Image (cartoon, rainbow, N blue to C red):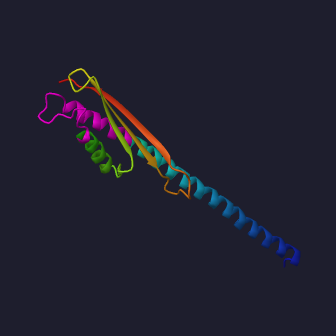
């Protein structure tokens, strides 16, 4: 039969195991949330980069010789192409800044640049400030 001193020591060890388990669980939850947040940040950055590239592709394909050119005077088609591509990846760019710049006009050989900036808000923000993600892409009008 065990003595009362051994019985009390066993209860302390059970409490220690519960406390260690609580510490480990809190650490693992923080680690998992951090990994999820970083994954979503990288996904958003990649989606914006691809949206800017899609805007450049649209501007290059609908260059000076196309039936509906997207020239410096009318960049709304390029902006809507960027916004629709971003919407396909579950990002709304209504609160973002999409800028289109034609260097040298809308002639073959001139350059078109599309820049997108997006205020990224963390999923588990807890009143954290938003971070602005910027993407830039450039291309040359060939025909």
| The furthest residue to the front | 73
| Residue 43 percent coordinates (x, y) | 42, 45
Q: Nearer the viewer, residue 78 or 4?
A: 78
| Residue 98 percent coordinates (x, y) | 35, 41
Residue at the spot 75% in from the left edge and 69% down from the top edge? 15
Q: Nearer the viewer, residue 49 or 25?
A: 49
Residue at the spot 51% in from the left edge and 50% down from the top edge? 130
| The furthest residue to the left | 67
Q: Is residue 40 left or right of residue 56?
A: right
Quadrant location, the N terminus = bottom right
Residue at the spot 25% in from the left edge and 42% down from the top edge? 76
| The furthest residue to the top | 109
Q: Is 75 drawn above or below residue 6 in the view shown?
A: above
Q: Is residue 121 left or right of residue 113?
A: right
Q: Is residue 82 magenta?
A: no
Looking at the rendering, the stretch of residues picked out in magenta corresponds to: 48-76
Q: Quadrant of residue 127?
A: bottom right
| Residue 18 percent coordinates (x, y) | 70, 67
Q: Nearer the viewer, residue 82 or 103?
A: 103
Q: Is residue 50 magenta?
A: yes
| Residue 123 percent coordinates (x, y) | 49, 56
Quadrant location, the C terminus = top left
- For the question of whether residue 3 can be seen, the reply is no
Task: Count every numbered label the image shows and give the total.
Answer: 0
- For the question of whether residue 125 can be seen, the reply is yes
Q: Is residue 55 left or right of residue 116?
A: left
């Amino acid at each position: 039969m065990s003595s009362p001193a051994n019985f009390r020591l066993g209860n302390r060890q059970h409490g220690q195991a519960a406390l260690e388990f609580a510490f480990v669980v809190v650490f693992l939850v923080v680690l998992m949330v951090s990994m999820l947040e970083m994954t979503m940040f990288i996904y958003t950055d990649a989606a914006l980069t691809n949206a800017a590239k899609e805007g450049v592709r649209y501007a290059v394909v609908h260059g000076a010789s196309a039936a509906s050119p997207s020239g410096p005077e009318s960049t709304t088609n390029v902006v809507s192409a960027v916004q629709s591509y971003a919407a396909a990846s579950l990002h709304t760019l209504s609160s973002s800044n999409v800028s289109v710049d034609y260097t040298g006009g809308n002639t073959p050989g001139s350059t078109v640049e599309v820049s997108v900036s997006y205020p990224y808000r963390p999923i588990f923000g807890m009143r954290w400030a938003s971070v602005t993600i910027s993407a830039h892409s450039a291309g040359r009008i060939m025909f």
